[in-house]
Amino acid sequence: MITAGDDWKIFPREGLGQLKFGMSPAEVDHWSKTYGAIAGRGSDRASDKLLKDTLEQFGGAMSDEEKQAFIAAYAQVGPSSDSVTETRGNPGLILRYEAERLVEIMPAIGQRPIFLDGVDLLAVGALEALAVLERLNGRPGRYANTEAAFDELAISTDGFCVTEKAAGVRTLSDGDERFQGRTVILREKPYLPEEEMERFIVHSVLE
C-alpha cells in the first residue's frame, strides 16, 4: 500500500517517490497533483548572443582575448544545450532534464518531508542527516563550502555543514541561516565535475 510518505521517499539513483530518473516531462506531469504544477521551465544554457551581450555590458575590464576565452570555456564546461530546468509549485520541486529525460531532483527550500531509510533528512539535526547518508553511502562523503556529496548514492546536500580550511568540516545548527536553507539534490549519476574536484575534501562524520 502506497502512503503519502512514500511520495517523498528517496530511492538512490532511481528517483523520489513516483518520480523516476529517465521520465519525460509528460510522464512527470502525470504526477502534478502530488508534486505541483509547472511554475516555470527554461534552458540552462545561455545563448551565444546573451553571453556576448552580457560581456559587452559587464565585461569592460576584460580584453577581447579574455572575452573569447570566457566564451570558449563556457562552451566546454557550461550546461549542455539540451539541459532544461523546471520548477513546480506547492509543494515545490526543482527538476532538471537532459534530452527530455529527468536527471536531477531538488526539493525547494523549506520542503518537508524527504525520507531516506526512514529518516526525514530535513527534520533532523545536520550531524544525524549526514551520518545517515555516510552510512548508506558505505564510505565518507566529499565536502566543500556548504556542500557534501555522497557518490555511491548520487546524492548531494547543501546547508547542512560548512568546510573551512582551518576548522575543517563543521555541522550547522538551527540558528544558522544556511541550515534554514538546507536542501538535498538527487541525481541519476554522482556529481563528479573534473574542473571542481580539487575543491572537495574527504571527511567522515562517523569517526
Image (tube, rainbow, N blue to C red):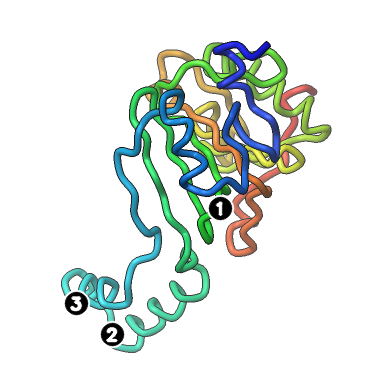
Q: Sort mark 2 into few (<14), some (14-19) or many (20+) by Cα contacts within 10 Å.
A: few
- Disc tally is 3
Which is more N-terminal, label 3 or label 2? 3
Looking at the picture, how far across and down is residue 149, in whole percent? 64, 40
Amino acid type at circle 3 is: Glu
Give the residue pinned by disc 2: 63
**SS at mark 1 in the image:** strand
Who comes first in sequence, dot 3 or dot 1?
A: 3
Spatial separation of the CA atoms under disc 2 and disc 3 = 11 Å
Q: Nearer the viewer, mark 2 or mark 3?
A: 3
Q: Residues within 10 Å of mark 1 (few under 14, many from 20)?
A: some
Q: Residue 180 location, x and y as percent? A: 41, 21
Using the rendered view, name the quadrant where residue 67 is placed: bottom left
Left or right: 164 with respect to 61? right
Quarter of the image where the C terminus is located = top right
Q: Give how far apart the Cα atoms at labels 2 and 1 are.
A: 39 Å
Q: Secondary structure at mark 2?
A: loop
Q: Which mark is residue 101?
A: 1
At 34% from the left and 54% from the top, the residue drawn is 42
Amino acid bearing label 2: Ser
- Marks 3/1: CA distance? 35 Å
